[in-house]
Image (cartoon, rainbow, N blue to C red):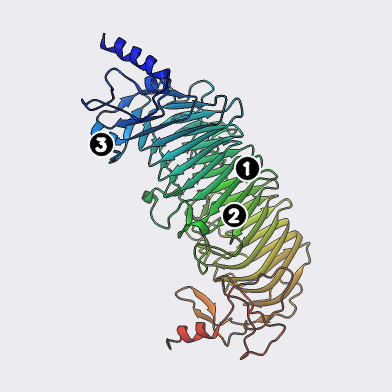
Amino acid sequence: MKKVFTFIGLMLASVHSLAVPVTLGNDANCTYNIANTSIQNLVDAFAGEIRVTKQVEIIENIQIDRSITIQGGYENCNDAALGIKNGVTTINGNNQAPVISISDGNDLITVIIDSLKLKNGVGLGSQHGGGISVRETNNNGIKIVLRRSIVSNNNGNFGGGVFLYGPSVSLSLEESKILSNEAVYNGGGIYCHQGFVRLSKDSGIILNSAYNSSNSYGLGGGLYAGSGCEVEIRSGTSGSLFNFKGIAGNSSSNHGGGIYAQGGSVVKLQSYLIDEFINITENFADSNFNGSGEGGAAYLTGAGTKLEVYGGLIKENSAVHGGGISVNNAAELIVGKFNGSCWNQKNCNQIVANEATTNGGFGGAIYSIGGNIDISYTDISDNRADNGVVLYADFGADIKVRASMVHDNGAGNADGWEDIYNFSIHNSDFIMNHVTSAYNDVIGSSLRIDGGSYTLENSIIYDPDPGVTASMTGVTGIENCLVVNSSDGLNQFTQSLVAFPNFIDVVNRDYHVRGHSEAADLCPSTVNSLDQDFEGQNIWDDPSQVNIFGFRDAGADETYLSDTIFASGFD
């Protein structure tokens, strides 16, 4: 009888809507008791804000088609009334349907989910996502804010954690985690079709999986961005996976362990808005070990598809090809600074310790078939592959590497990798400008170039092992103002030197050059030159040096007097 009275009361209340926050729990101070009132009852009664205690785990599948705020984390209903939180309230989908399904109405709706843990949901019918499933049909707009919440241990067809479908759907994560979800098809953590996703304030997409035995699926272990989805990532860490930030520890049976982007989707890593690296770390493609899986950190395909990395840490990812990033079919990768801004001017981007497989894997850091790549202000080190330890490109790729340090990649055929060539470029266009390539331990030569075109200028290529700078076949390019350990394999070698660059400390990987280096004030400006060196120092004409062919230093580092003084211990 009490349930009947409660239902009648809710129906009467809904005539004018429940305008003030209502509390839901199992103590005497609650507006409604969880024993006879569900969250769905209050949603249907047009509650504007529901505050749910964490006194019990709630088993429910909720459907929403209007604006509402649902908040949890309250010890009791007295705390809920006062807005005092401590932790999260758990809503268990009980493997029946998505925990929360959202569809649009006649106007823009805003759904705020605060301090909830959504678990054990499954995709059902057209609502593919397990934790949160959002489908826009009227194009009036759906805005979801996920704040201080966890979406974990859910399963879906597309979007194990979250499914977003529609051009006017947006999801903002604030201090929230998409954690340990699994997709049967694509998008283990989040699947986004046409919409918008933003990660900020210590949010993360962590330890999710897209797994399918078919080579057509299993794409995007952490995030699948398709059909023009826009993604902004403003959360990251240089620390452990278990900081639960950024894109980390995800896996895919096919391409894109961390991120898969296609169809003109754009993903941006925006460190200049926070004081930290934005990380894509410890992700893995080819989790079923069938030999199909590119792009451990990210896989990009198709014209208009783009990954913009402004202050990124791409570290310890692995795949068959492209241990770090795979860029294909006119997709674009940009790594650098945003209008000169980065979280750290001297240490803006790192692409470190990524691995292609030891079973014929190409492109330890980057792999590209017909993609467009522009890398600047980046430290690239400790990557491994059988061929193209740093980069492998073919079939009309367009590659620029500028103002960057490329060092200590490969390990001379140790640990199962063949480590053949540092850069392996085929039938593609390649520009290297103001790069320091130092002590990469590869087999064959530092550069392998056949077909296409190349420009090597204003750079240091000092790789004593293998000792051969280049292997060229069927191509003639520009080789100007280089400092190399050997001119073997180079065709032009104009205004260039065979000399030791006078690195400050090779043992400790300090490849700044000393003020009296042969590389100082050696080179002219070119159309490819940037205004700053890899650490953000402006290019200058050192009055103590005689300009040889110009006032720019060769390599990534522009030598300043202070560099030499501090390195010599006179500070």
Residue 265: give its label: 1
Q: Amino acid at mark 2?
A: Ile
Q: Amino acid at mark 1?
A: Ser
Distance in Å between CA atoms under marks 1 and 2: 19 Å
Q: Quadrant of the N terminus?
A: top left
Quarter occupied by residue 42? top left
Could you say which is closer to the camera, residue 516 or residue 89?
89
Q: Quadrant of the C terminus?
A: bottom left
Residue 101 coordinates in the image, percent (x, y): 47, 26
Q: Secondary structure at mark 3?
A: helix
Packing grade of label 1 (10 A; few <14, some 14-19, many >=20) is many
**Which label lies toward us, 1 or 3?**
3
Residue 552: give its label: none
Residue lying farthest to the front in this orientation? 16
Q: How many dots with numbers? A: 3
Distance in Å between CA atoms under marks 3 and 2: 52 Å
Disc 3, disc 2: CB below 8 Å?
no
Residue 358 coordinates in the image, percent (x, y): 52, 51
Residue 411 coordinates in the image, percent (x, y): 50, 64
Determine whether 208 is above or below 479 in the image.
above
Q: Residue at x 44, y 35 (%)?
A: 112
Packing grade of label 2 (10 A; few <14, some 14-19, many >=20) is many
Disc 1, disc 2: CB below 8 Å?
no
Which residue bears the numbered disc 3? 79
Distance in Å between CA atoms under marks 1 and 3: 43 Å
Q: Is residue 242 left or right of residue 375?
A: left
Could you say which is closer to the camera, residue 151 or residue 444?
151
Disc 1, disc 3: CB below 8 Å?
no
Which residue bears the numbered disc 2? 366
Q: Is residue 86 in sight in this rendering?
A: yes
Which comes sooner in the sequence, label 1 or label 3? 3
Q: Secondary structure at mark 1?
A: loop
